[in-house]
Each structure stands twice: as C-alpha cells, then as structure tokens.
Image: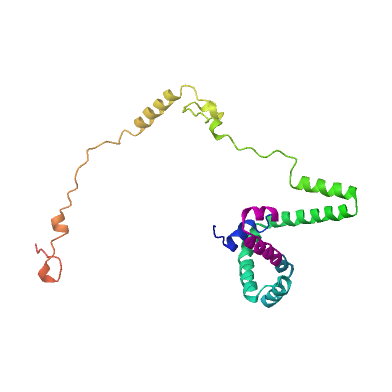
Amino acid sequence: MAQHNTLDVCRVDLFTAEKELRQRYPEVIVARVLRIREEYNWFISNPDAKDRQFIDNAVSRFAISKVLAYSDLAIVKAMLPHLSQASRDFHRYRYNEMILETFQMAKKRKDTKTMEKAASSYAKFNRVDLEDEQAVPYDLIVVQPFTATDDPTVLGIKPIPNIQERIDALISKYRAENIDIEDIEFEDADLEESSLFPPIDPDNGGAQETNIL
C-alpha cells in the first residue's frame, strides 16, 4: 500500500469533499485530514489564540494525545501560506457547506420553498447546469501563414511612387556634394615600435633599456 504524507495530502485535498477523500485515501488518512480541517477552521476563527490553547482545544475536542495535537498544529501552520493563496477554494467550500446545511434544515421543516432556493443557489454556484469544458483540439488549429513583403500598403502606408529611382537620385546627389572624399587603400602604420618600446633589460630590474642617441 502506498504511503501518504499528511501534509502533502492536506495541501491538495484539505477542502475536498469527504466522499471523494474516502475514494482516494485510507481511512486513517481521511480521519486525520477531516480533523485537521476542523482544527484549521478553529485556528482562523481564533487568530489571537496561543499554541497552548490550540493544543488544549484539540486534545479535549478530538480526544488525541498532546504529541499528536502538536503534530497537527505544525501541519496547520505549514498550510497557512498555501491556504492564503487558495482562499477562494476555502470560501467555496464554506459556501457549499452552509447551503447544504440550509437545505437539510429546510428539509426537516418540510420547507420546500427554502429547499428550492438552496438547491438553485447550489447549482448556480457550482455551475452544474453548464456543459463541461471541452479540450482544445490543438491538432486541428491551422497555423497562420506569413509571407514576407516590401509592400507598405499592408500596414496602411501609402507607397512613394518610383521609390527606387528617388533613392538612386539621392545617392548620386550626396556623392556629388562630397567629391573631396577619397577612398584609399589600407596601409600598416609605421610607428617605429623598436624606438617607442625598447626591449626590457632583465639585469636592470625589468627596466627598459635606454638608447642614448
């Protein structure tokens, strides 16, 4: 049988319906998740409570040992950042819980009007009247064709008539205005490096040799 880490299970399924939990996990895991769910609800309802108060409440309410209560407290505290991100899921869970409780109370009183309202609210909130979303058929998506062009009209720009002739004319014009520019061949610079950078004399502490003219 696969081993389940309670913290990992809580991160994924703390607010999952009990029926689904029993389909996924062993009874001992389900029982602890349900207990931690109640402990978490108590924790957020008593934000100023000390750890000792949490332990005392858990021990008296669920008849567990202090060791197990401290273990539960560690899981609840580890869950807080995760649950703050998933607060929407938590409120969904609380809403469904309240609506179902309202429905059950109305059913006991045979209040069909309230039962109908509760059932309608439940169905609307959980969107049970809508079709399940279909997966996107990626294999049927046609790739958008792209074609390179130098036609500016595709961007809504009016083309300049005889543009190439105008380009050639401007090149000829600016060449004529700069006739003093002369293209020359590359030549190595004669820097007389032997005089500017004399060899280093190792016998003179690395100093450069001095040539006296």
Of 185 and 6, nearer the camera is 6
Whether residue 138 is in magenta: the answer is: no
Where is residue 109 shown, x and y percent of the image?
Answer: 90, 54
Which x, y percent locates residue 62?
Answer: 71, 70
Query: Quarter of the image holding residue 84?
Result: bottom right
Rendered residue at 65%/72% (across/down): 69
Tell me: residue 43, above or below residue 146. Answer: below
The quarter in which the N terminus is drawn is bottom right
Evaluate whether residue 17 shows in this view: no
* Residue sitting nearer the eye, 23 or 106: 23
User: Does the segment drawn in magenta span residue 24?
Assistant: yes
The residue stretch that appears in magenta: 18-40
Quarter of the picture holding the C terminus: bottom left
Q: Using the image, determine if residue 104 lies above or below residue 147.
A: below
| Residue that extends furthest to the bottom in the rendered view of this protein | 52
| Residue beneath the point at 82% across and 47% down | 119
- Of residues 128 and 142, which is closer to you in this image? 128
Q: Nearer the viewer, residue 208 or 96?
A: 96
Q: Is residue 24 left or right of residue 185?
A: right
Residue 105, position in %: x, y? 86, 56
